Image (cartoon, rainbow, N blue to C red):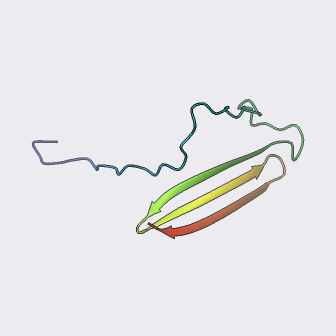
């Protein structure tokens, strides 16, 4: 690749959204990585994702209830 002048993309440093305190108590994994539910509304999960889209940063937060088919999403846009 070097002989042909081909280079890979250099990724920018990502956003640091959380600075954790090493002395703080860690939250327990309450569902033990078991994503099956035996009854509706017994387990909930969530996720937050940040994505650069041109001059904007898109934030998507999702919460999901297992077996109830309820998914809640929240999206926000902000300029860098």
Side of 13 relative to 5 (left or right): right
Q: Give the x, y percent position of residue 4.
A: 11, 46
Q: For the N terminus, which image quadrant?
A: top left
Q: Nearer the viewer, residue 32 or 7?
A: 32
Residue 32 drawn above or below residue 6? above
Q: Give the x, y percent position of residue 9.
A: 28, 50
Q: Residue furthest right?
A: 39
Residue 23 drawn above or below residue 39? above
Residue 54 drawn above or below residue 67? below
Give me the residue at 21% from left, 47% from top: 7
Give me the residue at 74% from left, 59% from top: 72
Q: For the C terminus, which image quadrant?
A: bottom left
Residue 58 drawn above or below residue 5? below
Side of 15 relative to 23 (left or right): left
Q: Nearer the viewer, residue 79 or 54?
A: 79
Number of residue marks? 0
Give me the residue at 67% from left, 32% from top: 26
Q: Nearer the viewer, residue 24 or 45?
A: 24
């Amino acid at each position: 690749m070097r002989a042909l002048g081909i280079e890979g993309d250099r990724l920018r440093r990502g956003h640091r959204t959380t600075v954790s305190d090493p002395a703080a108590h860690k939250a327990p994994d309450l569902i033990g990585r078991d994503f099956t539910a035996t009854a509706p509304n017994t387990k909930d999960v969530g996720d937050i994702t940040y994505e650069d889209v041109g001059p904007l940063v898109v934030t998507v937060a999702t919460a999901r209830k297992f077996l109830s088919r309820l998914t809640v999403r929240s999206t926000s846009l902000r300029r860098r």
